[in-house]
Image (spheres, rainbow, N blue to C red):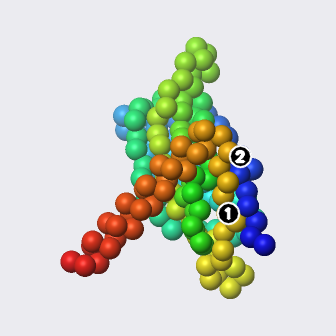
């Protein structure tokens, strides 16, 4: 029997404080630092869902929407949006929070694909996903559209 999990079972929320060594020449978060944190938290979610080894196959989309400043708390929320046979899409939402005023804003959204691997490094089946809440179901539907669009684009490119 194939194991089934909900997005809630493997979701992660974590936070960092943006320090001076995390910023670029403009004094805002260096995109590579945020990308590293996104990949790390997404990998943790994928590992939790698969109960095994995963590797990043692609960062499908990353959108930077607002700058993050030194001293801001950086909140990363990640969960499984979609699973295929041996791969899964993880969505990551990044927000900033001013620890003094409490004001917050979304700063970054990213979607990453991971592949589950067996002991020999070959792709291995991923536990099925059962979205439960309206938000989980919406994210799953949106992820299904993104997966379909990526496959269609790859097929068009291969035909050229």
Q: Nearer the viewer, mark 2 or mark 1?
A: 1
The local crowd at label 1, few if under 14, some if 14 to 19, many if 20 or more residues have their Cα within 10 Å, is some
Q: Residue at x 71, y 52 (%)?
A: 6
The reply to whether dot 2 and dot 1 touch (C-beta < 8 Å) is no
Q: Does the rendering let one see residue 91?
A: no
Q: Nearer the viewer, residue 22 or 50?
A: 50
Q: Write down the quadrant of residue 155 in the picture.
A: bottom left
Which x, y percent locates residue 158? Answer: 29, 78
Q: Toward which corner of the image does residue 119 lie, by quadrant?
A: bottom right
Q: Measured along the vertical axis of the image, is residue 146 above or below residue 69?
A: below
- Classify residue 148 by image quadrant: bottom left
Q: Quadrant of the N terminus?
A: bottom right
User: Observer-nearest residue: 65 or 84?
Assistant: 84
Q: Which residue is mark 2?
A: 8
- Report how far apart the C-alphas of labels 2 and 1 lie in the structure: 13 Å
> Along the polypeptide, which appears first: circle 2 or circle 1?
2
Which mark is on residue 128? 1
**What residue is shown at x 49% (from left), y 32% (from top)?**
106
Across and down, in percent, residue 16 comes to 63, 37
Looking at the image, the residue that sits furthest to the top is 101
Q: Is residue 65 left or right of residue 124?
A: left
Judged from the image, the secondary structure of the residue bearing numbered disc 1 is strand
Figure disc tally: 2
28 over 82 or under it: above or below: above
> Considering depth in this image, is 71 or 52 the residue closer to the camera?
52
Q: Where's residue 100, x and y in %?
A: 61, 16
Secondary structure beneath label 2: helix
Residue at the limit of the structure toward the left, as seen here: 160
Q: Residue at x 27, y 71 (%)?
A: 156
Point out the image quarter for the C terminus.
bottom left
Task: Please rate how many residues cluster around mark 2, counting C-alpha atoms within 10 Å: few if below 14, some from 14 to 19, many from 20.
Answer: some
Residue 5 makes an appearance in the image: yes
């Amino acid at each position: 029997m194939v194991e089934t999990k909900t997005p809630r079972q493997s979701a992660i929320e974590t936070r960092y404080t943006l320090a001076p060594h995390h910023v670029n020449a403009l004094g805002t978060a260096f995109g590579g630092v945020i990308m590293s944190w996104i990949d790390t938290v997404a990998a943790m979610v994928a590992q939790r869902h698969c109960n095994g080894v995963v590797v990043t196959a692609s960062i499908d989309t990353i959108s930077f929407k607002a700058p993050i400043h030194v001293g801001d708390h950086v909140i990363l929320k990640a969960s499984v949006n979609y699973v295929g046979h041996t791969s899964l899409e993880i969505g990551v939402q990044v927000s900033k929070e001013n620890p003094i005023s409490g004001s917050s804003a979304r700063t970054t959204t990213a979607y990453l694909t991971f592949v589950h691997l067996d002991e020999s490094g070959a792709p291995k089946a991923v536990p099925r996903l059962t979205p439960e809440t309206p938000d989980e179901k919406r994210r799953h539907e949106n992820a299904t559209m993104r997966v379909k669009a990526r496959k269609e684009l790859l097929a068009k490119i291969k035909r050229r």
